[in-house]
Image (cartoon, rainbow, N blue to C red):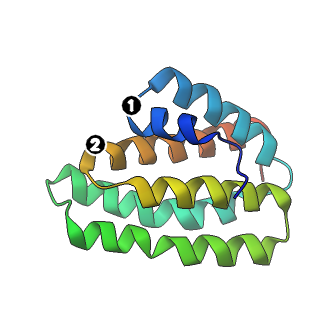
Amino acid sequence: MNGFLKPEEIDEILNGNSALLVEKAECVGKAIAKPVSSSQVRAIFGTIKKLQMSAQKGEFGEKQIGTLTLLIPKLYYAAKRSGKKEMEKLRDDLSTMIRKVKDKERFICLCNYLEAILAYHKAFGGK
């Protein structure tokens, strides 16, 4: 898999490196702004946002990790359907990150990263 991020960057982001999260989210948001529609990104973000709301209520365990893991096939479908190289790179990064989420802290970092990508996507002219 060849995403936007190096393996060590994925680990750093999931371990709470906020400065790296913002830096990389800006790069990714800019790269996907034109070729990837916001509806494609929001489709993924919607499920993650629901899980984030559950996590904020203290509900984060095997059930939520299972729901999160089921996003991986949806990412593959969305990437194939879009036919865009940038969506495939985003899929690779997010599916790797999802596989590494085993606790609430890493999940929150994933949520923050995806939310930042969405914000930068819009800021750089994503439709």
- Image coordinates of residue 105 in percent, x first then y, are 28, 42
Q: Badge 1: how crowded within 10 Å, few (<14), some, or many (20+)?
A: some
Q: Earlier in the sequence, mark 1 or mark 2?
A: 1
Count the labels in the image.
2
Q: CA distance from mark 1 to mark 2?
A: 8 Å
**Which of the 4 image quadrants contains residue 125?**
top right
Name the quarter where the N terminus is drawn.
Answer: bottom right
**Tag 2 secondary structure:** helix
Q: Amino acid at mark 2?
A: Glu
Q: Badge 2: how crowded within 10 Å, few (<14), some, or many (20+)?
A: few
Q: Amino acid at mark 1?
A: Gly
Looking at the image, residue 75 lies above or below residue 122: below
- Dot label at residue 112: none
Residue occupying the point 23% across, 54% down? 55
Residue occupying the point 65% across, 41% down? 5
- Image coordinates of residue 117 in percent, x first then y, are 61, 42
Contact check, label 1 and label 2, Cβ < 8 Å: yes
- Dot label at residue 16: 1
Q: Nearer the viewer, residue 62 or 116?
A: 62
Q: Residue furthest top?
A: 19
- Image coordinates of residue 39 in percent, x first then y, are 67, 64
**Which of the 4 image quadrants contains residue 89?**
bottom right
User: In the figure, is residue 69 to the left or right of 118?
Assistant: left
- Dot label at residue 105: 2
Residue occupying the point 65% across, 61% down? 91
- Image coordinates of residue 98 in percent, x first then y, are 45, 59
Q: Nearer the viewer, residue 69 or 125?
A: 69
